[in-house]
Amino acid sequence: MERLFFRLLNMSLAAVAVIAVVVLLRLFLRYAPKKWQYLLWSAVGFRLCCPVSFKAAFSLFRLKPTIMNSFGGAENVVILPQSMPSAAQLAVPAASAATAAAPITPAAVPAVIPAASMPAAEMIRLWPTLGIVLWLCGMAVMLALGIIRYIRMKRGLADAAALEKSVFATDRIRVPFILGLLPPRVYVPAGLGEEERKYVLAHERAHIRRGDHWVKLLAYLLLAVHWFNPAVWAAFFLMSRDMEMSCDERVLRELGGQAKAYSRTLLRFAEGRQFPAPAPLGFGESDVKSRIKNALRWKKPKLWITLAATVLCIAAVAACTADPKEPKETDMPATADTPWSWTSTLKATDIREAALKSGSVQEEVLLTEEQIGELTALLNAVPRDQVVGGRGIPSDRVLELRDTGYALRFAGGVIELDCEAPRASAASGYPAWEIRDETLNAWLNALWTESPFGKSDDPLGLTMSVKDASPTGCTLVLAQTGGNAAGKLQTGAAFFLYKQNAHGTWEEFEALRKGIWYDLAYSIPKGSGTLLTADWIHILGPLEDGHYRIEKKIMDVRGEGDYNTYSVFAEFDILGDAGTKTSGRFTVSADKCETWASGTIQVFEKEQSLLSVRILAELQIGPKDFGGVAFYLPAGCVLENVSCTYPEIDGAAGSDPPVNAWTTAGENEKYTTAIEIGRSRDEIPGGGGTGTVIIEASYPRDSGDPIRSMAFGVECGAEEKDGYVIMGIEHSEIVVEIRSP
Amino acid sequence: MEGKRLSYGEARFLDVIWENEPVSSGRLVELCRDLLGWKKSTTYTRLRILVEKGYVKNEESLVTALVSRSEVQAAESAYVVEQTFSGSLPGFLVSFLGGKTISAKEAEELKKLIDEHRED
């Protein structure tokens, strides 16, 4: 419906131009027979009802090709956000800054954007609908009026008696007119004199012979459709006048003069101006004064005037009716120009600038001159018959070709050339062309994938964000929605990490790239979110605060061995925990046993009366050692969690780490909680290995308890000496100062 | 006599009846179709109206007029004299004659008429 309405508006606007020209030409044709003026209106009529017309090399519309396009884009006053998945994610500001992992650089896009602009978008969309409703109402009114008038006339003329065939007399009318179409009937007032009757009938018959009753009806219908256009109203009135006057002239020619007598008759039936009606062709309609003047002035026209007028008329009608000729146009819609002809070569300077954009996101990526050159060459290489009418594709991948006023939109293997600014929806339906060229498609998609837009999500419909980033690892959230994944999505355990250095460039942690990963496959179901963990502590150790980027490789698996690999990225920050924090590093080793542990103990204030304790350590236990590594927590600590990768096999976490944790209830004990790793009271060595451990505990404290420090214990190894077994031959106490808040 | 005035259509209709009375309603419909271009329904409607007004009677589908031509003419003329000539008969006559001369025969007829209608 909207499409139709905008077509109509276009037509109406185009008609205004034609009407203006016709009015101008009428001035020139003033002294020529009126039938030429009358004829000119056919061009207007044509323009008002036919959206497409024949082509001509010259056309009025070549002067202003943009009328159509710019008007047709009335809906497009504002570039509307097509879909806001990324913005929607931004709309949830995460508590921890680590989640600020918008794939596109987290510019200052406030979270308010989705809420605020959606109503505006709905509002702009309201106008076309409102316009359509208004137009339909107007048209309904016009049609209703016409129908009502017709019915009333017919009723009032029920007892009109025939004088001759199709000529009726009645005393209910004062002015003669024509009513009806099949067959048209002439109604005259009763009691007409012989002379008057002669003229009246001649006039009305002339109308009928020329088919004016049909013309009037059509004109009225067009007026009903274009009721909002004042130029069309003016045209209707002027056309009616020309119709009447040209009819007068016909009659006078038939009668061979008698202009004076005829004028008298005209005068007798002079009525006031009436609201335009569809059917009756009133004898006294249309400005009787001018008609009388015209009739009196009438003489048989000179030949040269006739010829000149004919030529002028035909030329004008042709010029106004025709659309500008397209160089080659079979598939191209006729109502708009393409920026370049497919038969000529597009020059590299035609596209001044090309910008890659994603939907309505502010950021854009400008193509280099080289890339523009490549694009130009590719566009030139597209075979002519591979360009067909497009329907509009909803896609947020846009390449704006400035300043041609066109843009390329592509998704899922389809490329479209849209005019003007990228559309908000495909339904608005104004000219677009579909370009079917695989080379261009491949090039565009490669361009996209390499851009910052492509690197983060799509075509898999996958967005990755980081949650709970800490110096040891993080949790990844993979949200899958939509996208063009061909098969099932999977990923492995592997990930790669980059850190942003002072210059802003990304430096990769090579160790992860070279590391050997456990051969696992996690499937990523569509339409949902998947959680994965990524811990780097055992390869990289704890990382410092900074801005990082994590990369995961996703496989789109269609079948056995048939898959594509894509990379998804997410950026995050590792920030030191807020609150007072203290830490202590330690290294404890029992060389004899080839066992050692090294790491940090962190204590920080999670809440007012709650301290949080975290121990991060790397450890190694010797193959013959049965003592392992043990950690001790002071009284008052509550053990929350222990995660341990020891013993690691081929760099992957062991499935059943030999961890024991227990708490004593003893009072006045220094340590009440112990976490033992790789320790066997049976003195059976575990076989050794390396690993990392994370111990989390909390320490609730009373507000009135100003503890100053906490003491932790770490010990390694074991030995048997003189029949006694000593566990933890190397022991270290780590005191962590608690800074008062 | 004002009541006996007719519209143009009615006058034409009565003309047909006067010319052909007494006429069957079926035949009347045919005549109206040919002479007046009226549909059957139009004819029957107009017939009904005239019957109601008392100008015509329709008994057993036989139509006859209840008023005569002269009655209707008289009514029309009286109306014209009243409206246009403010009831002045001489005024009407002057206008009607309009500078024309009348033959001796016509003059005789007129004189006779005037004498018959003279108030005493």
Image (tube, rainbow, N blue to C red):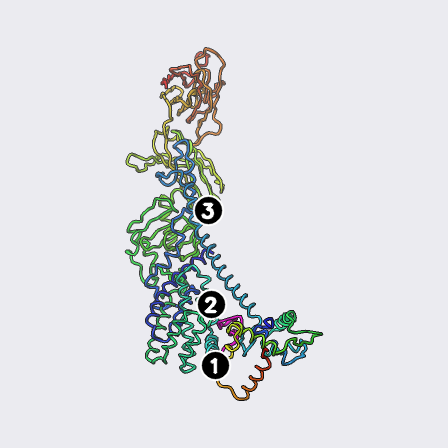
Indicate which disc, 2 or 3, sits on the residue closer to the N terminus.
2
SS for tag 3? loop
SS for tag 2? helix
- In which quarter of the view is residue A381 placed? bottom left
Characterize the local packing of mark 1: few (<14), some (14-19) or many (20 or more) Cα atoms within 10 angstroms: few
Label 2–label 1 contact, CB within 8 A: no
- Residue situated in front as seen by the camera: A343 or A720: A343
What is the three-letter code of the residue carrying label 1?
Gly
> Residue lying farthest front?
B120
Residue at mark 1: B98
Residue A640: % across, % down: 47, 23
Residue at mark 3: A485
> Residue lying farthest right?
B60
Q: Which chain carries label 1?
A: B
- Residue situated in front as seen by the camera: A305 or A194: A194
- Residue situated in front as seen by the camera: A245 or A346: A245
What is the three-letter code of the residue carrying label 2?
Leu
Report the span colored magenta: A171-194
